[in-house]
Image (spheres, rainbow, N blue to C red):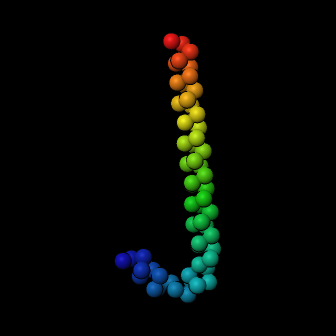
Amino acid sequence: MPAVVAVVNYAQLLMVEGWKIFLVIAISTMLTLGATGLVVDRVYRFEIWLQRRKMRNE
């Protein structure tokens, strides 16, 4: 409910600056998804490397 009140109270501000707010949200979302993807990829590669190392030592 407080979010709805903020939209009603600051409707004029959102009309003028809304695109900037949307742009910041979109960019931060893309950066977060990209960083998460990179971390998952690195952890996956590290796990494969550990498995191969374990196989060689046995």
Measured as percent of width and height from the top left, residue 24 is found at: 61, 67
Q: Residue at x 56, y 15 (%)?
A: 56
The quarter of the image holding the N terminus is bottom left
Q: Residue at x 52, y 18 (%)?
A: 54
Measured as percent of width and height from the top left, residue 2 is found at: 39, 76
Q: Is residue 51 above or below residue 13?
A: above
Q: Nearer the viewer, residue 47 or 6?
A: 47
Q: Quadrant of the rendered structure where residue 22 is?
A: bottom right
Q: Nearer the viewer, residue 37 or 12?
A: 37
Measured as percent of width and height from the top left, residue 10 is found at: 51, 84
Q: Residue at x 60, y 44 (%)?
A: 38
Q: Quadrant of the rendered structure where residue 21 is?
A: bottom right
Measured as percent of width and height from the top left, residue 36 is found at: 55, 48
- Name of the residue lying farthest toward the left: 1
Q: Is residue 20 above or below residue 43?
A: below
Q: Residue at x 58, y 41 (%)?
A: 41
Q: Is residue 10 left or right of residue 30?
A: left
Figure label count? 0
- Name of the residue lying farthest toward the top: 58
